[in-house]
Image (cartoon, rainbow, N blue to C red):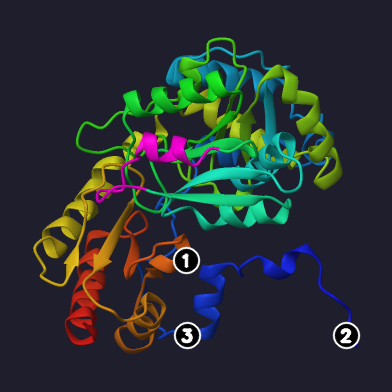
């Protein structure tokens, strides 16, 4: 008899890793897959690291919640950009990226067997995290344009519901949720004593005059809102693995229990780098949005109007989520696009889509590779569909 697997056995494999490991990838493949910006971190980030590499500050543990000066910088940023105030010593926990923050949030607010609401299509790592902590993700379909339907969400609430998750701008769809909808959900959470977990990793990637709203602005005393942020996208710092969460005071010590057990603290050197980013380079993403907007325009112009797909025009992040008019498997389509046409996309079923679909990422492309990647995609879909 073989040894029995534990709680991970029913959790899906990381879908992007799984797809790329089972496909034969041409050496000249163009990726419209993984969500990365084309730019790297500000020069101030690099210089801040070089200055402290030999000092104890760079290689010793910080406080579990993060270095105090860094949390002060985060609090300043939240007040200036997100328009809500926090106590840096009671509300902020620095984490090794946004995904770790979500795991901590899930563990803080649930017991085994509880439920967390996820609008669908969902970010697959959120689903995986909820299942890893022994809880149940409850999926609620968005509308035909991937916007939230608050009433559908509220209909799914049970006595086991502990949180509603929103991601805006959204991964995987790129949709930006309206202030009114986020306020309605946040107020509902307040009135029904459940948490609103707001993932705002793509907060700075906005197009066509879209605006970002942090739901914490509706929770004046910060009692039921958990906000998650990251440096991976806005500052091109994905490999640094640095992010943070803003939590109610009542959850602060609970979060530190998980933090101390899992990682003690976020890497000190990454905290130094991220603090430099906030103190010297707020608005950094804006330098690159015009370039990304040009690439986005190429996607819209080339793909809109094709008879075999629908592409709701998203105004945030750097994703489009295509609906394909076919009965073929999204996974098989994505695999064939890689192997025969040299273009990487992510199948929609990785994000819980119940219809044939593909997620396209355009943030990591120059205009040349965007044109070439879209040409390969269209050629492939013309034949496959």
Q: Is residue 28 visible?
A: no
Q: Label for residue 301? A: none
From this view, report whether residue 240 is shown above or below residue 47. Answer: below
Residue beneath label 2, please?
A: 2
First along the sequence among labels 2 and 1: 2
Instruction: Report crowding for label 2: few under 14, some 14 to 19, many 20 or more residues within 10 A (C-alpha).
Output: few
Residue beneath label 1, please?
A: 350
Dots 2 and 1: beta carbons under 8 Å? Answer: no
State the image coordinates of residue 153 (x, y, percent, origin top left).
44, 39
Instruction: Report crowding for label 3: few under 14, some 14 to 19, many 20 or more residues within 10 A (C-alpha).
Output: some
Label 1 vs label 3, nearer the camera? 1
First along the sequence among labels 1 and 3: 3
Q: Main secondary structure of the magenta part?
A: loop
Residue 293 shown left or right of residue 5 in the figure: left
Highlighted range, magenta: 142-157
Residue occupying the point 63% across, 52% down: 136
The N terminus - image quarter: bottom right
Residue occupying the point 80% across, 32% down: 256
Query: What kind of element bears circle 3?
Result: loop
First along the sequence among labels 2 and 3: 2
Instruction: Report crowding for label 1: few under 14, some 14 to 19, many 20 or more residues within 10 A (C-alpha).
Output: many
Query: What kind of element bears circle 2?
Result: loop
Label 2 vs label 3, nearer the camera? 2
Real-space Cα separation, disc 2 to disc 1, in angstroms: 29 Å
State the image coordinates of residue 43 (x, y, percent, origin top left).
50, 39
């Amino acid at each position: 008899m073989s040894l029995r697997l534990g709680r991970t056995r029913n959790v899906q494999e990381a879908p992007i890793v799984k797809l790329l490991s089972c496909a034969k990838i041409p050496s000249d493949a163009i990726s419209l897959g993984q969500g990365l910006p084309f730019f790297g971190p500000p020069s101030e980030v690099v210089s801040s690291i070089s200055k402290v590499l030999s000092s104890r500050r760079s290689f010793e543990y910080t406080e579990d919640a993060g270095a105090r000066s860094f949390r002060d910088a985060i609090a300043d940023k939240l007040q200036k950009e997100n328009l809500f105030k926090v106590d840096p010593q009671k509300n902020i926990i620095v984490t090794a990226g946004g995904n770790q923050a979500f795991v901590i949030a899930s563990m803080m607010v649930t017991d085994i067997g509880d439920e967390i609401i996820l609008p669908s299509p969902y970010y697959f790592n959120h689903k995986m995290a909820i299942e890893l902590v022994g809880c149940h993700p409850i999926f609620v379909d968005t509308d035909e344009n991937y916007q939230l339907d608050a009433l559908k969400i509220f209909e799914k609430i049970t006595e086991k519901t502990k949180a509603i998750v929103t991601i805006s701008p959204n991964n995987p769809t790129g949709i930006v949720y309206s202030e009114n909808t986020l306020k309605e959900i946040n107020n509902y959470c307040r009135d029904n004593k459940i948490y609103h977990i707001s993932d705002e990793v793509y907060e700075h990637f906005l197009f066509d005059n879209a605006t970002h709203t942090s739901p914490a602005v509706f929770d004046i005393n910060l009692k039921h809102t958990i906000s998650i942020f990251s440096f991976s996208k806005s500052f091109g710092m994905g490999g640094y693995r640095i992010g943070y969460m803003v939590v109610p005071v009542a959850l602060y010590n609970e979060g530190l229990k998980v933090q101390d057990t899992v990682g003690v603290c976020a890497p000190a050197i990454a905290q130094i780098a991220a603090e430099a980013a906030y103190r010297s380079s707020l608005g950094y993403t804006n330098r690159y949005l015009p370039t990304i907007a040009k690439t986005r325009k190429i996607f819209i112009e080339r793909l809109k109007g094709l008879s075999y797909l629908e592409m709701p025009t998203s105004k945030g992040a750097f994703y489009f989520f295509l609906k394909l008019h076919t009965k073929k498997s999204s996974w098989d389509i994505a695999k064939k696009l890689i192997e025969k046409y040299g273009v990487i996309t992510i199948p929609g079923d990785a994000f819980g889509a119940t219809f044939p679909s593909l997620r396209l990422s355009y943030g990591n492309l120059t205009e040349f590779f965007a044109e070439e990647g879209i040409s390969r995609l269209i050629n492939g879909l013309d034949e496959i569909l």
